[in-house]
Amino acid sequence: MVSIGPRDLGRAGFDNLPAAVARAGDRAAWRFVEFFTATIRNRNTRAAYAQAIKQFFAWCEKHRVNTLAQINPVVVAAYIEQHQSMAPTVKQHLAAIRMLFDWLVTGQIVPVNPAASVRGPKHVVRRGKTPVLKADQARQLLDSTNTDTIVGLRDRAIIGLMCYTFARVSAMTNMSIEDYYQSGKRWWVRLHEKGGKRHEVPAHHNAEAYLDAYLDTAGIREERKSPLFRSVDKRRAITANPMARTDILRMVKRRALEAGLPSSTCCHTFRATGITAYLENGGTIENAQAIAAHESPRTTKLYDRTGDEITLDEVERIAI
């Protein structure tokens, strides 16, 4: 069997094989690399799991656990017990270890999964931590954006679309011009969400107006296969290159600061803001779930901050 090369390791997110895997031979090494390259399609998940596995095997080496055969439930439990990160991170590390060893078991590299019986820390989330704007704050942000330039028109269209479709920022960066399309009398937006899912949502009339103004001024409406939201050059002219997630985040931070909004405002803020505004106006969790393309209504509920004002009113009843 051919040995693992640097390019193969790079695809998996590693510079070097963990020593315990390398000692197990080429077959184990290939199975290890295949876990990251063949079973995990999302790049962010792959990077997070690679980091978790690196830390686990580094800890094993430090504690003289030098082979795969030496890794047993007690070792995995000890690693989880000493982990200093917050509960969600620890649970993610345990999930990465458990999934990796499941893959090694099915590949007949190890006989049993040492992480299968290990329990992680309890972590129950009933309310998300995403910072949320009130509807009037979101309106303030949209109205304060200077639309005398193509950059302002673009930025307003991005923020508006995130508010009105509950879209993730990654879906914004992946959109082509053809993903804003007419069907019957309505305009629709096609979002490319996590896991390769295509999600189609009717365009709110405000989002439609923002997108039309941006596309018409930029003169790119007919370039159907090209990126929808593009970067600008030094002359502040639109290029043919798509914006990256970091570009959009910097833009959001800058626009929020200019509008006098909290510095915690981020791209995900508009997902939570849109969902909360929808529910406050009589929308249902089930329909909010459908618009947001969530797998479970429990996830959608994390973004629902409609109860915040009720809670504050009730607290003020404590007349001491």
Image (spheres, grey):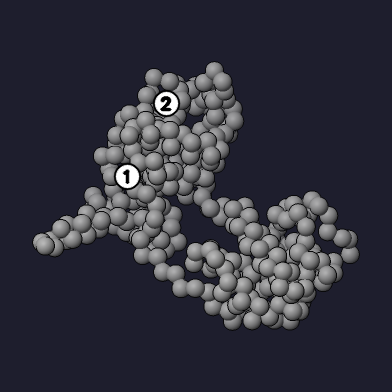
Q: Position of residue 317 (x, y in %)?
A: 12, 61
Q: Is residue 272 visible?
A: yes
Residue 34, above or below 113: above
- Looking at the image, which residue is at 44% across and 69% down? 123
Quarter containing the N terminus: bottom right
Viewer-proximal residue, 24 or 74?
A: 74
Q: Which residue is mark 1?
A: 133
Q: CA distance from mark 1 to mark 2?
A: 20 Å
Quarter occupied by residue 163: top left
In the displayed structure image, the side of residue 266 where residue 259 appears, left or right: left
In the displayed structure image, the side of residue 79 where residue 246 appears, left or right: left
**The disc labelled 1 sits on which kind of residue?**
Leu
Q: Position of residue 277 (x, y in %)?
A: 28, 48
Quarter occupied by residue 270: top left
Mark 1 residue element: loop
Q: Position of residue 130 (x, y in %)?
A: 39, 52
Identity of the residue furthest to the left in this view? 319
Residue 93, above or below 237: below
> Of tags 1 and 2, which is closer to the observer?
1
**The disc labelled 2 sits on which kind of residue?**
Gly
Q: Which residue is mark 2?
A: 152
Residue 301, above or below 281: below
In the displayed structure image, the side of residue 29 where residue 102 appears, left or right: left
